[in-house]
Image: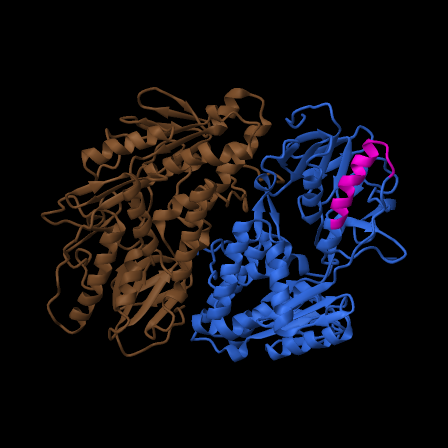
Chain colours: A brown, B blue
């Protein structure tokens, strides 16, 4: 059965995924002589960099996600379908999805990445990933549920475990989430739970390598550790997690930690679609593409953003999996698809690296732009402005800004709501 | 096993439920010589009158719910526990809950009401209730899911059913939801789904009685019907729903309607707790109470709000199940519990009826205050202000006000997000 999409007499470009790359590509095809079909299993675009603020009760979901149909309101050649792609049939040029088959002339894989647990024992079942809005909301619920439980238990070891937070992964996500958890500990939770002793609450950032924010220079990396320690976090470097049972975290150095909260932000892998041969898929499940993001060995199949693996002299290990790469690739591919249709020469991708930034807490952020690097309040304001302006939609910006000002002034986080209690599949759902 | 709550040497008042009544009671006991224990299965208070705006993508959940612990921040004698009460053991004066047992000196049942399907065939399984935030979010998802599906189906009868909305119940909830659905049809959905013919979308309000808003006078009741028709709704009076299979609604008058969306707002019943004998429970599962809200036959068990059934000369059929009654009863019971403790005379409850109001759409509302009644723009503004000021928390008021202004000016509803797709239990969860 075919998906019901108007048949027109221009080439059909099917884009799978409405992340930063897919969104940019579809927008820039607005005036191109093509029909754009965007398929995403979510009817909204997610601003992933702020997911950690949803997890920590600082922002509600609607401020960082935006309805796809609203983004493309009025774009005549655009068609969105709410569905999930299952398989690619490259010979006959069509996709199999859960809502039917969809033929294409040009196919762009922009499915991004998902959490990579590296097959470590117990992680997938017991740890919390934070790559989607639903995962962030589940984490928000679990954090609050565990404090409600901590009030009830009398066994101190169990109570400590419920109040211990271990974040694994020293990248921006891990650092930012760790900072946010420290601020919950300092300013918010003690008011909510006066019966609990928050000197007992531990926030530990665990990194298997020897550094945090490895994309930054040494000065900023050192400052990141300082900032986290000032906020009360423990930073454990060169420590590998090898097992988790939901209560105890086993590490390679033999140092076990008791924690009911393990947030895994230590790796990603591409969201692969069936139909590609092994030789175009990297170990991290990325698709090998050429300099115009064309998947190796295919005429009309492309991959952009985190899932694309493009090797250049400057990036012998592939490009970094960050939003700017996805946006720039989406932008360029729009032009190149038109070039291909009009049999003109295509333009190879060259990544313009604007730099990187991470925030740790109020007045504490790290910014790196080319040779310049700075932090502190100025860095923090820079981080706020850049992120605020990157959020899709004026309304969302206003709501986010208001929440940020409110949280800053009140030292509070208002959205500590257990709207859908989180239960691991194997658990019996309690009445509450 | 007992719930872990500090034992103190003052009487313990246990309140079950943090709706309008329980919230008001707990607040007014702040300075009373008692320990207040509040148990609710949600860690937040819900402003139910605006649930319909969450269902129709106008407001996000966090603007109408508020964390219980934040409300009572700093109230020394207050203890909240996240749990669900299962059974009352009146002889030994303790509650059985899913988190342990809890003894009490005074017990107040403020559990409110839930949807009453009256055992009508298929309703509980196939229709959508809207009494909780989760139910409102599920409805929001279902509405959007069905339009996504409507795009895919080619069978016109099936497509029409997906685009038909039947709201049953002519009270404020039914009227307000019907109006909001009409505004989605007029201003929002056609932009999202240019491929669909919205002349086909029907919004039908079905009421088994001969009138809408029966608590209002005839002028306002007539105006309500006019307003709804102006907005494009069909109003069916004197029509009883007797069966629903998820596609077709069977009515007593034999007139069937094809609709995949049936929202049931036609009745409530008390959220009863085991342990009461039949003679204190009314057919609508309300608890018979005396003039100080004491449950008939009990010394120290009370019921307030929607679940309390108090008969007076002025209200021979019990008091209306509205927020003001709950708030006034909670307020008075706080004083009376202190009176009982101090062996002083108690004060009987007298309901001060401030009037009633309902909004149908932009610039269209109906207000009734004593002998005065008015509608139109002035009524609408009155409705907005009264509701805005009733929302708990300044932040929530600002966010709600901003969203209202935004929605009013832009004719838009921004939160059309399928964050958690809704699936009926018996359905297989599709991949998307």
Name the image quarter holding residue B264. bottom right
User: What secondary structure do most residues of the magenta stretch adopt?
Assistant: helix
In this picture, residue A400 sits left or right of residue B335? left
Image point (77%, 75%), residue name:
B218
Image quadrant containing the N terminus of chain A = bottom left
In this picture, residue A189 sits left or right of residue B326? left
Picture coordinates of residue A63, whole percent (x, y): 43, 54
Is residue B332 shown above or below A231? below
Image point (17%, 57%), residue name:
A297
Picture coordinates of residue B192, whole percent (x, y): 44, 70
Name the image quarter holding residue A99. bottom left
Q: Which residues are magenta?
A: B328-345
Image point (31%, 23%), residue name:
A252
Q: Is residue B342 magenta?
A: yes
Q: Is residue B332 magenta?
A: yes
Near-viewer residue (B371 or B356): B371
In this picture, residue B136 sits left or right of residue B77? left
């Amino acid at each position: 059965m075919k998906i019901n999409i108007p048949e027109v007499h221009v080439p059909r470009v099917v884009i799978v995924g409405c992340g930063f790359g897919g969104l940019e590509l579809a927008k820039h095809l607005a005036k191109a002589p093509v029909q754009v079909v965007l398929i995403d299993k979510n009817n909204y675009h997610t601003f992933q960099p702020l997911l950690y603020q949803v997890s920590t009760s600082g922002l509600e979901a609607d401020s960082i996600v935006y309805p796809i149909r609203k983004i493309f309101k009025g774009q005549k050649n655009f068609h969105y379908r709410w569905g999930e792609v299952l398989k690619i049939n490259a010979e006959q040029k069509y996709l199999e999805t859960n809502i039917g088959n969809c033929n294409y002339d040009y196919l762009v894989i922009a499915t991004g990445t998902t959490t990579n647990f590296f097959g470590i024992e117990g992680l997938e079942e017991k740890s919390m990933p934070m790559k989607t809005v639903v995962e962030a909301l589940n984490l928000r619920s679990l954090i609050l549920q565990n404090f409600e439980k901590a009030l009830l238990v009398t066994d101190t070891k169990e109570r400590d475990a419920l109040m211990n937070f271990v974040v694994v992964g020293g990248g921006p996500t891990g650092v930012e989430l760790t900072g946010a958890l420290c601020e919950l500990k300092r300013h918010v939770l003690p008011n909510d739970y006066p019966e609990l002793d928050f000197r007992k609450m531990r926030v530990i950032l665990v990194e298997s390598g020897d550094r945090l924010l490895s994309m930054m220079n040494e000065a900023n990396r050192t400052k990141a550790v300082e900032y986290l320690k000032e906020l009360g976090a423990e930073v454990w470097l060169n420590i590998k997690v090898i097992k988790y049972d939901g209560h105890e975290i086993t590490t390679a150095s033999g140092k076990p930690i008791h924690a009911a909260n393990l947030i895994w932000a230590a790796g990603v892998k591409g969201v692969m679609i069936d139909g590609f041969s092994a030789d175009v898929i990297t170990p991290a499940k990325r698709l090998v593409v050429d300099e115009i993001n064309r998947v190796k060995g295919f005429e009309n199949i492309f991959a952009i953003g985190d899932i694309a693996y493009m090797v250049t002299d400057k990036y012998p290990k592939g490009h970094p999996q960050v939003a700017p790469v996805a946006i720039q690739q989406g932008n360029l591919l729009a032009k190149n698809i038109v070039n291909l249709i009009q049999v003109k020469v295509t333009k190879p991708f060259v990544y313009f690296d604007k730099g990187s930034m991470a925030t740790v807490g109020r007045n504490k952020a790290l910014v790196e732009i080319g040779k310049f690097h700075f932090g502190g309040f100025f860095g923090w304001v820079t981080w706020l402005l850049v992120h605020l302006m990157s959020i899709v939609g004026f309304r969302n910006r206003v709501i986010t800004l208001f929440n940020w000002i409110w949280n800053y002034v009140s030292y509070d986080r208002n959205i500590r709501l257990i709207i859908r209690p989180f239960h691991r599949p194997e658990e019996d759902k309690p009445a509450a």
